[in-house]
Image (tube, rainbow, N blue to C red):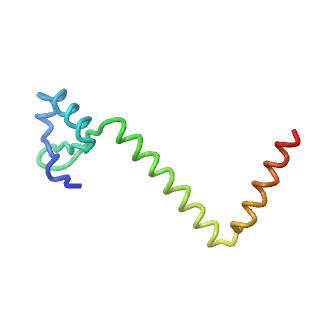
Amino acid sequence: MNYAEGIEPVTVLKTRSAELIRLARQTGQPIIITQNGKPTAVLQDVESFQRQREALTLLKILAKGDQELGEGRGISHDEVLARIQRKLEDLERG
């Protein structure tokens, strides 16, 4: 992903916002908005934003699990499967 291609000054955002929004939606790439030559904001389509948030949430969950395993608080794969099997059997019995 080359962010250098999607950099626009805030004046372009002010004058051609609909065009920038259309571009962000079509490409799925963020557009970096600069102010006084420095990056200050990011314009991103909603679908890409949602996927990014979901990926970040998953990474946080994985990091938490890794931390818990490191602290000895995890359970084995076999134990997880056994617990799931017991839950399924309980559901079948009603």
Residue for point 35% across, 41% down? 48
Residue for point 65% across, 71% down? 71
Of residues 19 and 17, which is closer to you in this image? 19
Judged from this view, the residue extending furthest toward the right is 93
Q: Position of residue 9 (x, y in %)?
A: 12, 41
Query: Along the horizontal axis of the image, is 16 left or right of 74?
Result: left
**Residue 46 drawn above or below residue 78:** above
Judged from this view, the residue extending furthest toward the front is 92
Of residues 8 and 77, which is closer to you in this image? 77
Query: Along the horizontal axis of the image, is 85 left or right of 34?
Result: right
Q: Position of residue 63 (x, y in %)?
A: 53, 62
Q: Quadrant of the N terminus?
A: bottom left
Q: Quadrant of residue 14?
A: top left
Q: Position of residue 64 (x, y in %)?
A: 58, 60
**Residue 93 drawn above or below residue 76:** above
Q: Position of residue 33 (x, y in %)?
A: 19, 42
Residue for point 80% across, 49% down? 87
Query: Along the horizontal axis of the image, is 13 left or right of 46?
Result: left
Q: Give the total of numbered labels.
A: 0
**Residue 1 drawn above or below residue 78:** above
Q: Quadrant of residue 61?
A: bottom right
**Residue 70 drawn above or below residue 60:** below
